[in-house]
Amino acid sequence: MAVDLRRRVVSRRPGKRTGRIIAAATLGVLSAMALFPALFTGLDPLGADVSAILQPPSWAHIFGTDQVGRDVYSRVVYGAGYSLGTGVGATAIALVVGVVFGTLAGLVPRALDGVLMRGVEIVMAFPEFLVALFIIAVLGPGPANVIIAVSVAAVPAYIRVARAETLVVRRAGYVEAARGLGVHPLTIALRHIVPNTLGPLSVIATIGIGTAIVAAAGLSFLGLGPQDPTPEWGLILAGGRNLLAVAWWVAVFPGVFITATVISATVLGRSLRAHGTGGPR
């Protein structure tokens, strides 16, 4: 009782509520940029103007221009679609694969479960970005392969959580009752087990979107993702890394957007975790 009361008091702190509102608003604006970039800028992100090379931020170009005269603001706005799309797509793939294999690991015989989880632990022993680099080395560079690489690197964490939740739910009374009534195991898994794994996994997925965006931007920064002149945050950042002394704005603004996205996703994810999202249904 005392612990629950303290959690309620902590969750009602104005600072935390304000942080959640700001994070949600930030992600809302970024999502709107990704879906409707023309509402935020009328400039062409690919349009080069040799008479406006490396101009500092001004009313005409609020984020300045890059080394070929392209408007940095329009490139950052249109880059939201690529970066957020990659992060959400990779997280969605990792979530689906993690739920499938994690649920199977929790339902199959112990010997098979042990083999699967040893493999998961081996992959998790390496940093996700290193695993993504290995996948890219095998598949080759490209936007689609970046999504595959980032999702494969993230899958083990989802498998582990889905398996843990499955082991708990499979012993619940309503699952035992359904099994006693002769309900097909596949029906039990789809109706009772999988829905109860999605709550905790949704929290991880919210945080994972930010992690996926960082990983994808890192791969693009290394030249392994979309190629110039594609307006992608990591690629824009890479194009400005050698210009910091003369044109800081080329690299700073996409870096700010990446940071804001990751922080906002992390704040919302931790908020969901603190409020205990998920639970038996």
Image: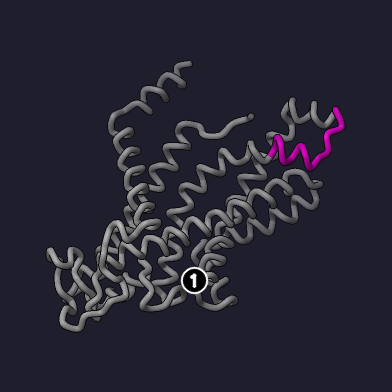
Q: Is residue 94 left or right of residue 60?
A: right
Which amino acid, by three-letter code, is at mark 1?
Pro
- In the orientation shown, which residue stands out farthest toward the top? 1
Q: Is residue 93 above or below residue 278?
A: below
- In the orientation shown, which residue stands out farthest toward the left? 58
Marker count (numbered): 1
The x, y position of residue 246, in whole percent, is 16, 76
The x, y position of residue 139, in whole percent, is 58, 76
Residue shown at the point (24%, 81%) measured from the top left:
68
Residue shown at the point (59%, 31%) measured from the top left:
279
The x, y position of residue 20, in whole percent, is 35, 38
Q: Is the image coloured rainbow, by chain, by secondary structure, or in one colour?
A: one colour
Residue shown at the point (76%, 37%) measured from the top left:
188
In the foreground, 54 or 77: 77
- Which residue range is magenta in the image? 181-193
The x, y position of residue 210, in whole percent, is 43, 54
Dot 1 alpha-carbon crowd within 10 angstroms: few under 14, some 14 to 19, many 20 or more: some
Classify residue 81 by image quadrant.
bottom left
In the foreground, 123 or 52: 52
Q: Which residue is mark 1?
A: 143
Element class at badge 1: helix
Q: Is residue 70 left or right of residue 88?
A: left
Q: Is residue 117 above or below residue 276?
A: below
Classify residue 183 by image quadrant.
top right
Q: Is residue 43 above or below residue 268?
A: below
Q: Is residue 265 above or below residue 172?
A: below
Q: Is residue 225 magenta?
A: no
Q: Main secondary structure of the magenta part?
A: helix
Q: If the image is split into quadrants, where does the C terminus sit? A: top right
